[in-house]
Amino acid sequence: MNRLDQTFSALKAQNKAAFIAYVMAGDPDAGTTLAMMKGLADKGADVIELGLPFTDPMADGPTIQGAALRALASGMSVKGVLKLVEDFRQTHPDTPVVAMGYANPIFIYGFDAFAKDAARVGIDGLICVDIPPEEDEDLRTALESTGLSLIRLATPTTDEARLPRVVANTSGFVYYVSTTGVTGAKTGESQAVNEAVARVKAACDLPVAVGFGVKTSERARDIAQSADAVVVGSAIVEALHTGGVDQALHLAADLAQAAHSARG
């Protein structure tokens, strides 16, 4: 099993949900991101989701859009993201890292080249927001050849006819977007999220992670009752931007504790 499979298997055995923490690579600089990655792992993040900055992040709200622009201004690139993971692996060999971004930078880098280099530095999977299942064969083949997971998104508008297509050839976990719209904008209603998690679980045997709009420990605890993982991005990015590393890590520690203790 790879790091993602091992992590979810271990947490399932303990009847715990995972806490997945997002940070934008290069916001505000590479050194801060590396400190955040190490701190998140040390404060209880089971998986780190590392954003690849892009000029037109269509699925992201103002908070992560701003982080992407700051990261690009600091000189962050796909190569820089790979270097961050390589450096992170020197001290944290076991924490899964999932890259999250958009097709354009990966296409320019080259799907095959990205997959090989990502596997070499220790990336475990990729969420590519803007390539639908009907168009991701080249990317998926490249990732599969190096053992990386292609993690797809399901949303409130993914109906029964489309859900099997979304989960087919997905690995690692399925990311359920709890709201329509962009990251950080609003919060999904609890009963609707629980029902959606059950629907996705019925369609596949993968863990289901829930994100978009999760900002508080209370909300994380609520989602962790039914989901296999809770994803928090915008709240951590905002805390880092306004309060620095210590404030962001304090929030992350509270969120991790909430997710881990929700069922016990």
Image (cartoon, rainbow, N blue to C red):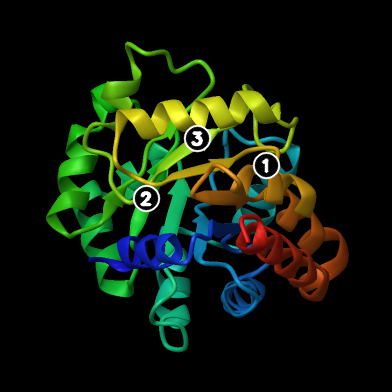
Please name the residue that numbered disc 1 is placed on. Answer: 65
Q: Name which quarter of the figure residue 154 lies in.
A: top left
Q: Secondary structure at mark 3?
A: strand
Please name the residue that numbered disc 2 is placed on. Answer: 126
Mark 1, Cα crowd under 10 Å, few <14 / some 14-19 / many 20+, is many
Marks 3/2: CA–CA distance:
15 Å
Question: Which is more N-terminal, label 1 or label 3?
Answer: 1
On the question of residue 154 being in view, the answer is yes
Three-letter amino acid code at the position of disc 2: Leu
Marks 2/1: CA–CA distance:
19 Å
Three-letter amino acid code at the position of disc 1: Gln
Cβ–Cβ under 8 Å for marks 2 and 1: no
Cβ–Cβ under 8 Å for marks 3 and 1: no
Residue 168: horizontal and vertical position, in percent?
23, 31
Residue 100: horizontal and vertical position, in percent?
47, 49
Please name the residue that numbered disc 3 is placed on. Answer: 176
Q: Residue at x 33, y 67 (%)?
A: 6
Q: Is residue 19 above or below residue 206?
A: below
Position of 93 with respect to 182 (left or right) is left
Q: Residue at x 50, y 25 (%)?
A: 155
Position of 160 with respect to 253 (left or right) is left
Question: Which is more N-terminal, label 1 or label 2?
Answer: 1
Question: Which is more N-terminal, label 2 or label 3?
Answer: 2
Marks 3/1: CA–CA distance:
20 Å
